Amino acid sequence: MNSTFPQVIFSEPDIHDIRKSGLAGVDMHFHTNHSDSPTRVRDALALAKKKGIGLAITDHNAVSGVTESERQDASVLLIPGIEISAWDGPHILLYFFSVQDLTECYEKHIKDTKSASPCLATTLTTPDIAALADDYNCVMVAAHPFGYLLFNKGLAKCIERQYLPPRMYNAFDGLEVISGGMSRKLNKKAAEVAKSRGMCITGGTDGHILPDLGHVLTCAHAETTEEFLEAVMQQENCVIGREKNLIEKCVMASAMLPQYLPYTIPSLEVHYRQNIPRVRHFFEKYPKKTDKKQ
């Protein structure tokens, strides 16, 4: 492991070799049926235990999957987490040193901000989330920084499109540099941004179905949640993993679709309301470009 900057290794993790090296490997981005996945918590824990890896359940705007995993006590290294869907676009991963802090943060700041499509968005903006994270001992990471597709669900993508100012990077501890749902090109781009800005790095599958679990791991010398997150913060970790292929992405999307069908109309309303400012922003920029050419 590089002492000045953690390695980002694009390959299928060899869990046997990772454990033999004394490293704990954790899939830092995984969803359960407590948000937009059909995967049961007990099944995710059982597979993580079988594989010999740790797990961060990061359900969208929900913590009940984390609290269920704590009750099950499956002898798996658990990193309490949540993925918050910011109103202005980015998906933001918060990792806590304790379930108690996570649940307190959720009850106080997140629970009552969910939209009518609860997994899709909250009314919290990126600056709002950064401000609430300052009140807790947690690690704030931008999920899939350059994703997804036409949607502005990544911090770096929003900054690149000038929806958010570049100084917003300063509010984050790190970037997710291997996201299982992104392309290799965009993951490499995220890794370059993290390196240039001296940010810590994480990786996770962004998995929603059981076969996704464990194909991207964040690895560090650690035995406890506290040791693991401290290693990430100190940039004493590496990220090893591969992206999903097209077939895997299609299977996952098919599994997710039924979770959103009951919220079709609210989801369309959220997309409409979120994209009005972006359309306005585009037309405000366009005349300025034309003026410069003249």
Image: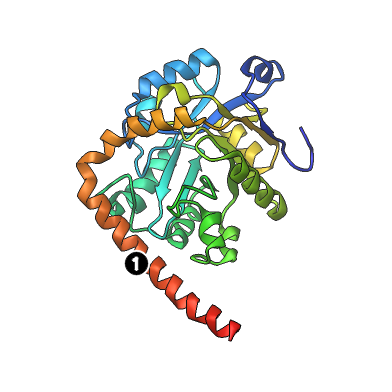
Residue 108 image point, x, y percent: 34, 51
From this viewpoint, which residue is outermost toward the right? 3
For label 1, the crowd category at 10 Å Cα-Cα, with few meaning under 14, some 14 to 19 and many 20 or more, is few
The residue at the point 46 percent across, 28 percent down is 248
Q: Which residue is mark 1?
A: 276
Identify which residue, 109 or 171, lies in the foreground: 171
Give the residue type at disc 1: Ile
Residue 128 image point, x, y percent: 43, 61
Secondary structure beneath dot 1 equals helix
Q: Is residue 81 above or below residue 141?
A: above
Residue 189 image point, x, y percent: 64, 48
The residue at the point 63 percent across, 39 percent down is 232
From this viewpoint, which residue is outermost toward the front? 294
The answer to whether residue 74 of the structure is visible from this angle is: no
Quarter of the figure that contains the N terminus:
top right
The residue at the point 55 percent across, 21 percent down is 53
- The reply, left or right, for residue 275 in relation to residue 263 is right
Q: Is residue 232 above or below residue 290?
A: above
Q: Is residue 266 above or below residue 1?
A: below
- The reply, left or right, for residue 115 in relation to residue 152 is left
The answer to whether residue 81 of the structure is visible from this angle is: yes
Identify which residue, 60 or 81, lies in the foreground: 60
The residue at the point 78 percent across, 36 percent down is 2
Quarter of the figure that contains the C terminus:
bottom right
